[in-house]
Image (cartoon, rainbow, N blue to C red):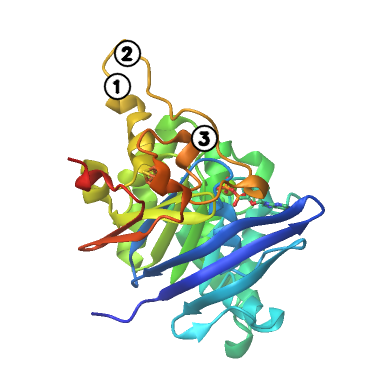
């Protein structure tokens, strides 16, 4: 087996608020092989973004990493100084956000921003010439499906459509040849047809360049067409993980089953979608035991105690009554 690129162990990222401690990420463990594509899914508020921000050291007060370990290529990132983290962020680990405005500067042309992003990580090798920077930037724009890239370098972010702007943000993320990209719902705000295009392109880019990808989405369907493995998150925990095909075919956790049943593709024409009853719990008032219990059709007295970790070959779940054990 190759050594993992990323190994997250018992990560806990908590927000210390006036109303109490929100344990947004509470004991998350997973690993990622070089070049692997991992989907991270769960309803809004389950802790997906906070997991992503934790990986790149961008958790702001009142939040902080309260425990656990994030090893990237053998190096511990938890507790790393901001100066050292900055050398990794954007270079070895890049992030793409739902809103490209979070990364794009409205008053600089795309070409200038891409040149700056290249320079920022090139101190060790001296300056990149303007021409070399423009060539690399243009090639990246072409790679993410932007036509007439050389001309488009002179444009400002607002001169691109929403879909094209997100492609620019993806090109920026790819610029320094990262080993890992964390993409946090980057296509959620876009048209379904554009989402599908970007998804397919992202997968081929990741495959071609050997870049590992963590693709965060509230939509299990999106992840299923893209990822090798999937992590299902609920109330700050990974409640199920495994190869995408196996998890979709036969989920172990009732929550994963619920997510699957609520996909439009699963419904018969004319039939109502089976929504998971209830809503995501407040992290400040989680029930004792399994946090999914109030919404779970399989809940019984056992579920008032913390669910055990169920191990199957290549797969795991946190549940007292995994679905493959049901009589
Ligand atoms: N700045 C913050 N202050 C307090 N709590 C926060 C903050 N950011 C996130 N949280 C808590 O973390 C939970 C998970 O947030 P997030 O990771 O953004 O969810 P999602 O799965 O939708 O990406 C939120 O429901 C909230 O309880
Ligand atoms: S532990 Fe119990 S309540 Fe939680 S998901 Fe499993 S069966 Fe449902
Ligand atoms: Mg989010």
In the picture provided, is 70 more to the left or to the right than 7?
A: right
Element marked by disc 2: loop
Circle 2 residue: 271
Please identify, in this view, whether the residue under mark 3 or under mark 2 is nearer the observer: 2
Q: Mark 1 or mark 3, which is nearer the start of the sequence?
A: 3
Q: Position of residue 33 (x, y in %)?
A: 33, 71
Residue 9 image position (x, y, % from top left): 47, 73
Q: Which circle marks residue 190 in the picture?
A: 3
Question: How many discs mark residues in the rendered view?
Answer: 3
The quadrant of the rendering that contains the C terminus is top left
Please report the residue visible at 37 percent of the width from the left and 69 percent of the height from the top.
32
**Above or below — where is 267 with respect to 239?**
above
Q: Secondary structure at mark 1?
A: loop
**Which residue is painted at 58% across and 66% down in the image?**
12
Bin the neighbour count of mark 1 within 10 Å (Cα to Cα): few under 14, some 14-19, many 20 and up: some
- Real-space CA distance between mark 3 and mark 2, rounded to the nearest whole angstrom: 26 Å
Q: Residues within 10 Å of mark 3 (few under 14, many from 20)?
A: some
> Does 285 appear above or below 131?
above
Q: Mark 1 and mark 2: span between their CA atoms?
A: 6 Å
Q: CA distance from mark 3 to mark 1?
A: 24 Å
Contact, mark 3 vs mark 1 (Cβ under 8 Å): no
Q: Is residue 184 left or right of residue 60?
A: left
Report the residue that reaches farthest toward the top.
270
Q: Dot 2, crowdedness within 10 Å: few (<14), some or many (≥20)?
A: few
Name which quarter of the figure residue 45 lies in.
Answer: top right
Q: Nearer the viewer, residue 160 or 313?
A: 313
Judging depth in this view, the residue of 310 and 316 nearest the camera is: 310
Q: Position of residue 285 (x, y in %)?
A: 65, 46
**Residue at the (57%, 79%) spot, across then down:** 77
Q: Are marks 1 and 2 in contact (CB under 8 Å)?
A: yes
> From where the camera sits, is residue 176 visible?
no
Q: Which residue corresponds to mark 1?
A: 267
């Amino acid at each position: 087996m190759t050594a993992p690129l990323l190994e997250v162990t018992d990560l806990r990222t908590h927000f210390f608020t006036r109303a109490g401690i929100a344990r947004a990420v509470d004991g998350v463990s997973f690993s990622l092989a070089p070049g692997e594509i991992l989907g991270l899914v769960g309803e809004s508020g389950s802790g997906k973004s906070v997991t992503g921000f934790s990986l790149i050291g961008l958790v702001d007060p009142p939040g902080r990493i309260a425990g656990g370990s994030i090893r990237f290529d053998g190096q511990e990132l938890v507790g790393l100084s901001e100066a050292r983290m900055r050398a990794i962020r954007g270079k070895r680990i890049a992030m793409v956000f739902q809103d490209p405005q979070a990364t794009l500067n409205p008053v600089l042309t795309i070409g200038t921003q891409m040149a700056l992003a290249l320079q920022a990580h090139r101190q060790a090798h001296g300056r990149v010439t303007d021409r070399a920077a423009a060539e690399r930037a243009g090639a990246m724009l072409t790679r993410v499906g932007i036509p007439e890239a050389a001309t488009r370098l002179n444009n400002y972010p607002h001169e691109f459509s929403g879909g094209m702007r997100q492609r620019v943000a993806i090109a920026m993320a790819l610029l320094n040849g990262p080993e890992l990209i964390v993409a946090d719902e980057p296509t959620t705000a876009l048209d379904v047809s554009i989402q599908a295009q970007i998804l397919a392109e992202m997968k081929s880019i990741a495959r071609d360049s050997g870049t590992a990808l963590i693709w965060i989405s509230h939509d299990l369907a999106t992840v299923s067409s893209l990822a090798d493995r999937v992590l299902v998150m609920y109330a700050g925990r990974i409640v199920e993980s495994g190869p995408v095909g196996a998890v979709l075919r036969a989920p172990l956790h009732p929550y994963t089953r619920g997510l699957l049943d609520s996909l439009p593709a699963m419904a018969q024409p004319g039939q109502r979608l089976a929504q998971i009853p209830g809503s995501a719990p407040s992290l400040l008032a989680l029930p004792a035991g399994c946090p999914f219990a109030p919404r779970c059709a399989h809940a019984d007295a056992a579920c008032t105690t913390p669910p055990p970790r169920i191990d199957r070959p290549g797969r795991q779940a946190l549940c007292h009554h995994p679905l493959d054990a049901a009589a």
